[in-house]
Image (cartoon, coloured by chain):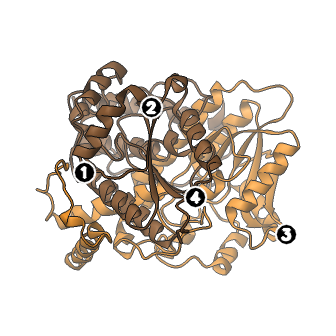
Chain colours: A brown, B orange
Amino acid sequence: MIGRRFLLCFAFFAVASAVSLPDSQHLPRPLILEYPTEKWFDEEQEVVSRCTTWRFAVEANNLNPWRTIPAECAEYVRDYMTGRGYSLDLELVAAEAGAFARTVESKDDGKDVWVFDVDETLLSNLPYYKERGYGLELFDKHEFGIWVEKAMAPAIDSSKKLYEQVQYLGFKVFLLTGRSESHRGVTEVNLLEAGFRNWDKLILRGADDHGKPATEYKSEKREELVKEGYRIVGNSGDQWSDLLGSSISNRSFKLPNPMLQQKTFHCGALIPHPF
Amino acid sequence: MIGRRFLLCFAFFAVASAVSLPDSQHLPRPLILEYPTEKWFDEEQEVVSRCTTWRFAVEANNLNPWRTIPAECAEYVRDYMTGRGYSLDLELVAAEAGAFARTVESKDDGKDVWVFDVDETLLSNLPYYKERGYGLELFDKHEFGIWVEKAMAPAIDSSKKLYEQVQYLGFKVFLLTGRSESHRGVTEVNLLEAGFRNWDKLILRGADDHGKPATEYKSEKREELVKEGYRIVGNSGDQWSDLLGSSISNRSFKLPNPMLQQKTFHCGALIPHPF
């Protein structure tokens, strides 16, 4: 199985490294970095290395649009999401956000704001994704809605600590989510059950927002906040579409999520995975 | 040695997880994710896990300002930079950039542009960083200048393929570097010796640009290009300061570099490493 995977990986990279310049091999190459190759045939390590590379490309927003995780990385993503990797990444991003928040001199006018996304930022839908291969199955909006209505998503502990910390520092807390207005009630119940208290606004997609790309919808909502005189000091989200666009915060914090990608740009076709 | 490191790591994370809420342990916590802990005492694996988390935070632009890599990650960063990890990451980002470039319908007016940074994007300074612990020593502008004057930096092979590919597709290639105008000659010699040909502009820091943060300098230069009617379709750089700011490209591609960080924001104090 791993052997077949390796062949697939190898075949892709052979194609990728040829790129599409017909005569690139005839160009002068006086100075090329050389990398060690002694581990080339450790197949299991090779899959881990390639999937780590893929995950970093996700988190640095380098990937072209994709719909499901690469089949070859199914075990890798599962191990990451359920193991130390994901929890360590969550802890560090919360610690850095908290360290930054403590350096901000908050004004006493109640206009300093920290924006949080909800899913995979404050609440974890791991129980839902566990049943669907951690991103291996196509995201199904309808099925996800049924899960949301159960109001059973647990808190992400490190985000909850940050949430409480920024409240303690005097920031207003605004929750800006791609969930629909029709899920306001269950979302409030879930947040309360998971231990979140005293948010200042919970903004959901209204009737006019459906069909808008996430970046556009969230930028518009942030713009409205800025027009109301709020200063968006920090923003925490697991999707680049939570953080990019207009009226962005002074500092953005990208939480890890290799399971799902929302488009952050208009251009660029859906391109097969590099595996 | 590893044992001492582990104690240091453990001590930090104990502090980090306490955050600064004085009574956070008394808050209700009905639903908290639980993570497996069976590997907690595999010390070497623990250092690798924590340094991977640190590297992820670098590449996702989550870290507060830092000057040198964490001492505990010295071996990890060296192994990454000289091993398969760095080369795989470089190959994937170039492959994704190339795949995106092929989807762009270039107009025939010569105004479609791809912007490349130079250091750690087209040229590799690994021979320089090798002598300085791969980011373990404080960056010394004067010493780096002496290295630059040798014009001996090798090409990053995957970037060279992308460079040739976007030229082949009809884009203009503009190089936008933080190097000084006084290094124009040696930079041109180095680029030519490394096999780069026919760039359309090489923009370096002029007398007016010295002292400006990289994000500001590069944004100003991109703005000038846009005013001249160019469309910045793609941008490749190893620093977030190459990619963020104003007049940004349609798509940005962040090349890996855990050795060095240029500030991308004005706010936020220098905060000790989380190790």
Visible in this render: residue B79?
A: no
Relative horizontal placement of residue B182, taking residue A82 as reference (left or right): right
Q: Amino acid at mark 1?
A: Gly
Dot 4 and dot 1 residues touching (CB under 8 Å): no
Residue B227: tell me if it is visible.
yes
- Residue B208's tag is 3
Query: Could you tell me residue A222's position as x and y percent?
Result: 57, 44
Which residue is the site of mark 2? A274
Do tags 2 and 1 sit on the same chain?
yes
- Tag 2 and tag 3, C-beta contact below 8 Å: no
Q: Distance from label 4 to label 1 (Cα)?
A: 27 Å
Q: Residue furthest left?
A: B38
Q: Which mark, by number, is residue A195?
A: 1
Marks 2/3: CA–CA distance: 43 Å
Which chain is mark 3 on? B
User: Closer to the camera: disc 4 or disc 1?
Assistant: 1
Mark 4 → mark 2, Cα distance in angstroms: 34 Å
Q: CA distance from mark 2 to mark 1?
A: 41 Å
Residue at point 34% right, 73% down?
B275
Residue on which the image places disc 4: A250
Mark 1–mark 3 distance (CA, rounded to whole Å) = 53 Å
Identify which amino acid the numbered label 4 is placed on: Asn
Chain letter of the residue carrying label 4: A
Asked if residue A139 is positioned above or below residue A56 in the image, the reply reads above
Same chain for mark 4 and mark 2? The answer is yes
Q: Position of residue B126 (x, y in %)?
A: 54, 64
